[in-house]
Image: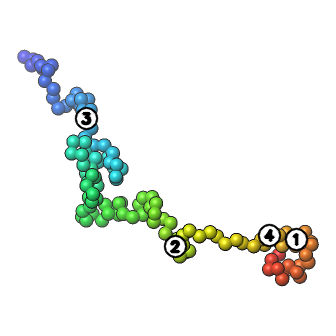
Amino acid sequence: MKLKKSGNVQGNGTESFGKRRNKTHTLCVRCGRHSFHFQNSRCSTCAFPATRKRTYNWSVKAIRRKTTRTGRMRYLRHGPRRFKTGFREGTEAALRKKVAAASTSVQEGIISPSKEEKIGGKR
């Protein structure tokens, strides 16, 4: 005796996986991960649109992935260079005197090497 399958009942097997077209998560605007839930309107990684970022201190590796110096650092990366000049702003560089004219005249033989030492050039 053979049992006949009814065609209108859908199982959970291989055929049903083709029907699953609805995505639950998409890209998050704040963290960029594929964790923003459509129906909840909340990111499971950073808790966007909440003001505070979602963090739990249970994983050292997770903190290491998201900390400073893991991204672009648009502001912080210029700090060391600005520190060298004392964080100066709104100034122009001072004019530098031309030293190239004296060195070319020595090469052409116009000025003797003894005068070159007084100018400060090196051979």
Q: Please tell me whether mark 4 sits on a helix, a strand or a loop.
A: helix
Mark 3 touching mark 4, by CB under 8 A? no
Could you say where residue 29 lies in the image, as x and y percent from the top left? 34, 49
Question: In 3D space, how far apart are the residues under numbered discs 3 and 4 (Cα atoms)?
Answer: 71 Å
Q: Nearer the viewer, mark 4 or mark 2?
A: 2
Question: In 3D space, how far apart are the residues under numbered discs 3 and 1 (Cα atoms)?
Answer: 78 Å
Question: In 3D space, how far apart are the residues under numbered discs 4 and 2 (Cα atoms)?
Answer: 31 Å
Q: Nearer the viewer, residue 87 or 17?
A: 87
Quick check: can you spot residue 81? no
Q: Residue at x 91, y 75 (%)?
A: 111
Residue 53 found in image quarter: bottom left
Q: Please tell me whether mark 1 sits on a helix, a strand or a loop.
A: helix
Three-letter amino acid code of the residue under disc 3:
Asn
Could you say where residue 80 lies in the image, as x and y percent from the top left? 51, 71
The numbered dot on residue 52 is none
- Sequence-wise, the earlier of marks 3 and 1 is 3
Considering every residue shown, the one lying at the far front of the view is 90
> Left or right: 16 with respect to 32?
left
- Sequence-wise, the earlier of marks 4 and 2 is 2
Question: In 3D space, how far apart are the residues under numbered discs 4 and 1 (Cα atoms)?
Answer: 9 Å
Quick check: can you spot residue 35? yes
> Left or right: 107 with respect to 48?
right
The residue under label 1 is 105
Residue 110 found in image quarter: bottom right
Three-letter amino acid code of the residue under disc 2:
Phe
The residue under label 4 is 100
Three-letter amino acid code of the residue under disc 1:
Ser
> Left or right: 42 with respect to 116?
left
> Left or right: 75 with respect to 104?
left
Up-down relation of residue 16 to residue 84 (above or below):
above
